[in-house]
Image (cartoon, rainbow, N blue to C red):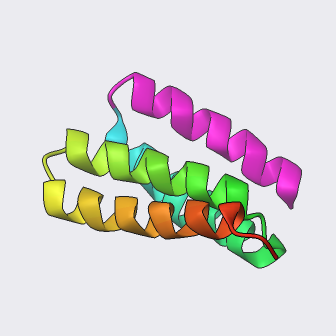
Amino acid sequence: MRSRSYTLGKIADALARRGALDEALQIWREEELPVCERIGDLRERAVVLGKIADALVDRGGVLEGWRCGVRRWACSRSLASPR
């Protein structure tokens, strides 16, 4: 499960670099992010949320990108807090 998600994430990264943001967003949202949430990997979840936010802003969805960035910030903040 994790290795498949990792591979799909690399494919999404390559698609985003080539400008295929819709396809990259689909992989990040539907494949990679759910796996991060399912296995409880907060760090990787924050990374994926950041990629999604960046892609949304690049597509012109500033408000949606900002909202995703806020979710990333919350995730990153929970990583930094002592448990």
Q: Which residues are magenta?
A: 1-19
Q: Is residue 54 above or below residue 32?
A: above
Image coordinates of residue 77 in percent, x first then y, are: 57, 65
Residue at x-position 83% and y-position 72%? 39
- The secondary structure that dominates the magenta segment is helix
Along the line of sight, the residue nearer the viewer: 43 or 5: 43
Q: Classify residue 66 by image quadrant.
A: bottom left
Along the line of sight, the residue nearer the viewer: 61 or 70: 70
Along the line of sight, the residue nearer the viewer: 4 or 69: 69
Image coordinates of residue 59 in percent, x first then y, are: 19, 44
Q: Is residue 59 above or below residue 10?
A: below
Q: Is residue 56 above or below residue 19?
A: below
Residue at x-position 16% and y-position 54%? 62
- The C terminus sits in image quarter: bottom right
Image coordinates of residue 51 in percent, x first then y, are: 46, 45
**In this rendering, would 31 be left or right of 54?**
right
**In this rendering, would 24 be left or right of 19?**
right
Question: Is 33 contained in the magenta span?
Answer: no
